[in-house]
C-alpha cells in the first residue's frame, strides 16, 4: 500500500469508529435508492433510471434478472448459449465491465474480469431492480462508467407472523424450479429468508453436435433489520450461490464436450449500523461489505491430480462511512437540502495460477461528497464529487451534476445529468501471463443526457424520451498485433435515444413499451460488437375474472447487430403467460417463451433456446 493510501485508509477507519447511517423507514416504491448517497424521490431524480419491481417480476414470471433487464431501455444482454452460460449486460453501448452491479449494496462485479456474470442471478427473493444509466463514478467509484444495476432483495414485515411462499415449477428441457420464502418480524426487528433450487438439461450450446449443456443453481438469501434503540439500528444481509454449468470446448467456435463443466460459488454479505441524531437532522452510516467468488473447471478427459489448482479465487472487503446533514431554508427558495460526506476503504485479492503473479492484492481508498436540494417544490438539484486513490494506478477525480424540473399542473418533468467515470484495468487484463499488460492505464469517460417525461390523463399515460452522449478514452482492447491487452488511441463514441412509455388503457389492461437507438463506435468508426443499434419491447397485461386471473404477452426486437464485426440476423421474441388465483392461498401459472420458435444468436457461434413451456404452482400460508 502506498503511503498516501495508507494515511487516507486510517482516516476512513477512524471515521468508521464513530458509527452509523441513514435509518429512516422509506417506501421503496416511491424512491430510487441508488440515485444518491441518500435515497431520492422518483420525480426528483435528474439521472436517467428505470425501476423493475418485484410485482412486475412476479407477473411476468421472470426467472433470471438478465431477462428482466432485456426489457429496460438502454440495456443490451448477451448470453453465450444455454441457461447458466456466461451472460453479459451492457448499458448505453459500454462494455460489461463498465456496469457496476450491487446486490443489497455489495459490489458483485467479478475481480478477475471486472464484469459481473448474470448467469447465476435468479429473481427469487428480489424486491426490485434499479437501473441507473450514465457515468456514476462520483457516487460509486471505479467501474460505474456507463451505469449501475442495483439489486434489492425483499425485507421482512414488522409486527407480522411468519408468512411462507412456496413455488414448484416444471417445464421443457427437464427444467425444475423449487423455491421457498419466509418473511416476518416483531415490533423491533424483521427478517426475510429465501432459497431456490433450479435445474435444467439445457440446450446444445454449440452449433454442431447434439450434447446438451445442463445447469444447476442453488441460491440462498437472508436479510435482517433490528432496532437496537430508537436512534440506533442494525441490518445484515447474506447471499450464497452455487452454480454448476456444462460448457463446450472452444477454439475458433464452440464444439461439443460431454465432460467439460464450470462451477462457480459466490458469497455476498454486509453488516451496517444506522444512527440518527438531532431529530433526524444528522444521520450517519457505517457498513462493512464482503464478497468472494470461487471458480473451478474440469474436463474428465484430461483430468489430473492438479485439478485443485485449476480456476481462480477472489475476495473483496469494503469499509464505508457516510454522514448526512439535513436542513431547510424556508425563507430562501423554500428549500430543503442534504449534504453528505463519505469515506471508503476497499481491499481485494485474487489468486490465479496462470497469472504472472499468482496471488495479487490491491487497495483502494475513496473520498466523496454529495449534495441534493429541493427548491420551490419543483426544482431538484444534485451534485457529487469523488476522489479515488488506487494502489497500482494514478489517482482519479470524478464528478456528476444532475437536475430535474417539474411543471405544476402539466404533468411535464425535465431531467438531465452530466458526469465523468473511470474503470481500472482488471486483474486478467493486467497480470495474465500470456495476455496481461502491466502498463495499462484506467479507462475514462465523459457523458451527459437530457430528457423529458410527460404524464397525461391523471397519470394513466406516461412517456419519457432521453438523449445520451458519451465519450470514452483509453479504452482497453485486445491487440492482435501484440497479442496483449492495450489502451486504444483515440475516442470511442456512444450516443443514442431511449424511449419508454406506459398506458393504463382500462382498469384491467396496461401497455408498456420501450425503444432504444444506440450508435456505439470504436475510434476507427466501426460499430461495437454485441450492441444492437435498434431494440424495442412491447408488453400487454390483462387482468380478468375480478382480478383472480392475469395474462400477458411481451415481445422484443433486436436489429442491426454485429459480433466481432460479423453481422448477426435481426430477431423478434414473443413470450406469453397467464396465472389464476384458485383461492387466497393457491395460484397456478404457466408461460411459453419464444412462442414462434425463433432461430437466432445473441453471441456469434452459440445456440439459443427454441420454444419452451413452463407450468407452476405457488402457495402462500
Image: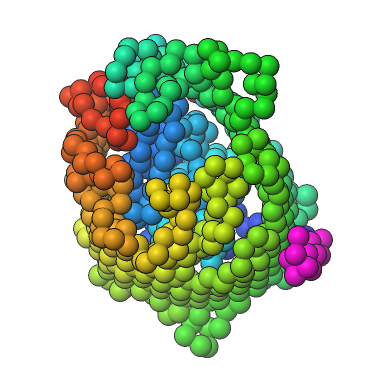
User: Residue at (23%, 51%) from the top-left corner?
Assistant: 533
Q: Residue at x 49, y 18 (%)?
A: 260
Residue 583 included in the magenta stretch of the image: no
Q: Position of residue 57 (x, y in %)?
A: 39, 36
Rendering coords of residue 570 (x, y %): 18, 38
- Say which quadrant the N terminus sits in: bottom right
Identify whether 384 is placed above or below 266. below
Quarter location, residue 77: top left
Q: Quadrant of residue 491?
A: bottom left
Relative height, residue 437 to residue 510 (above, below): below
For the residue pair 586 and 302, the one nearer the viewer reads as 302
Magenta stretch containing residue 12, yes or no?
yes
Residue 423 x %, y %: 52, 58
Count the numbered circles shown: 0
Q: Is residue 261 above or below residue 504?
A: above
Image x and y of residue 136, in percent: 48, 62
Residue reaching furthest front? 481
For the point 31% across and 47% down, which residue is it? 529
* Res 617 seen here: no
Q: What secondary structure is the magenta-colored segment mainly?
A: helix
Q: Is residue 560 left or right of residue 415?
A: left
Residue 438, picture quadrant:
bottom right
The colour mode here is rainbow
Q: Magenta segment, which residues?
A: 1-17
Q: Is residue 594 visible?
A: yes
From the viewer's perspective, tell me whether residue 327 is left or right of residue 493: right
Q: Residue at x 50, y 80 (%)?
A: 335
Amino acid at each position: 500500500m502506498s503511503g498516501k493510501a495508507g494515511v487516507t485508509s486510517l482516516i476512513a477507519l477512524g471515521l468508521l469508529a464513530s458509527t452509523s447511517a441513514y435509518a429512516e423507514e422509506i417506501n421503496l416504491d416511491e424512491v430510487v435508492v441508488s440515485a444518491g448517497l441518500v435515497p431520492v424521490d422518483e420525480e426528483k431524480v435528474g439521472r436517467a433510471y428505470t425501476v423493475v419491481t418485484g410485482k412486475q417480476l412476479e407477473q411476468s414470471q421472470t426467472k433470471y434478472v438478465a431477462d428482466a433487464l432485456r426489457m429496460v431501455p438502454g440495456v443490451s444482454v448477451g448470453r453465450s448459449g444455454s441457461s447458466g452460460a456466461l451472460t453479459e449486460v451492457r448499458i448505453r453501448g459500454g462494455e460489461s465491465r463498465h456496469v457496476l452491479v450491487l446486490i443489497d449494496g455489495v459490489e458483485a462485479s467479478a475481480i478477475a474480469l471486472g464484469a459481473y456474470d448474470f448467469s447465476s442471478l435468479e429473481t427469487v427473493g428480489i424486491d426490485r431492480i434499479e437501473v441507473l444509466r450514465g457515468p456514476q463514478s462520483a457516487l460509486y467509484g471505479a467501474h460505474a462508467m456507463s451505469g449501475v444495476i442495483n439489486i434489492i432483495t425483499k425485507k421482512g414485515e414488522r409486527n407480522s407472523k411468519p408468512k411462507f411462499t412456496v413455488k414448484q415449477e416444471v417445464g421443457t428441457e427437464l427444467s425444475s424450479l423449487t423455491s421457498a420464502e419466509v418473511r416476518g418480524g416483531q415490533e423491533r426487528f424483521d427478517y426475510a429468508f429465501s432459497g431456490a433450487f433450479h435445474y435444467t438439461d439445457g440446450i446444445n450450446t454449440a452449433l454442431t453436435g447434439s450434447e446438451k449443456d445442463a445447469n444447476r443453481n442453488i441460491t440462498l438469501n437472508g436479510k435482517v433489520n433490528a432496532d437496537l434503540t430508537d436512534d440506533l439500528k442494525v441490518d445484515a444481509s447474506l447471499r450464497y450461490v452455487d452454480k454448476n454449468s456444462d460448457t463446450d470446448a472452444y477454439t475458433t467456435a464452440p464444439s461439443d464436450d460431454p465432460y467439460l463443466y464450470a462451477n462457480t460459488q459466490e458469497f455476498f454479505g454486509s453488516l451496517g449500523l444506522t444512527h440518527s441524531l438531532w431529530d433526524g437532522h444528522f444521520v450517519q452510516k457505517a457498513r462493512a461489505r464482503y464478497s468472494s467468488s470461487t471458480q473451478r473447471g474440469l474436463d474428465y478427459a484430461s483430468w489430473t491430480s492438479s485439478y485443485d489448482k485449476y480456476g481462480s479465487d477472489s475476495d473483496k472487503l469494503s469499509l464505508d462511512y457516510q454522514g448526512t446533514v439535513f436542513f431547510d431554508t424556508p425563507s430562501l427558495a423554500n428549500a430543503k437540502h442534504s449534504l453528505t460526506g463519505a469515506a471508503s476503504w476497499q481491499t481485494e485479492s485474487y489468486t490465479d495460477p496462470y497469472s504472472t503473479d499468482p496471488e495479487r492484492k490491491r487497495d483502494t481508498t475513496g473520498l466523496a461528497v454529495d449534495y441534493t436540494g429541493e427548491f420551490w417544490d419543483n426544482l431538484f438539484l444534485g451534485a457529487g464529487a469523488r476522489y479515488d486513490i488506487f494502489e497500482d494506478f494514478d489517482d482519479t477525480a470524478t464528478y456528476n451534476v444532475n437536475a430535474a424540473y417539474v411543471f405544476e399542473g402539466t404533468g411535464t418533468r425535465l431531467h438531465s445529468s452530466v458526469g465523468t467515470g473511470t474503470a481500472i484495468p482488471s486483474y486478467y487484463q493486467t497480470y495474465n501471463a500470456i495476455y496481461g499488460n502491466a502498463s495499462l492505464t484506467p479507462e475514462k469517460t465523459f457523458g451527459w443526457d437530457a430528457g423529458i417525461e410527460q404524464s397525461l390523463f391523471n397519470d394513466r399515460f406516461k412517456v419519457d424520451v432521453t438523449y445520451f452522449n458519451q465519450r470514452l478514452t483509453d479504452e482497453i482492447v485486445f491487440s492482435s498485433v501484440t497479442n496483449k491487452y492495450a489502451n486504444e488511441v483515440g475516442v470511442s463514441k456512444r450516443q443514442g435515444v431511449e424511449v419508454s412509455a406506459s398506458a393504463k388503457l382500462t382498469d384491467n389492461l396496461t401497455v408498456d413499451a420501450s425503444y432504444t437507438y444506440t450508435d456505439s463506435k470504436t475510434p476507427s468508426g466501426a460499430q461495437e460488437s454485441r450492441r444492437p443499434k435498434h431494440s424495442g419491447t412491447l408488453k400487454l397485461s390483462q387482468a380478468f375474472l375480478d382480478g383472480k386471473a392475469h395474462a400477458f404477452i411481451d415481445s422484443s426486437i433486436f436489429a442491426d447487430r454485429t459480433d466481432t464485426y460479423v453481422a448477426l440476423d435481426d430477431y423478434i421474441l414473443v413470450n406469453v403467460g397467464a396465472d389464476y388465483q384458485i383461492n387466497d392461498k393457491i395460484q397456478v401459472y404457466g408461460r411459453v417463451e419464444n412462442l414462434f420458435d425463433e432461430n437466432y444468436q445473441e453471441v456469434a457461434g452459440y445456440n439459443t433456446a427454441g420454444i419452451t413451456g413452463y407450468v407452476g404452482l405457488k402457495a402462500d400460508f
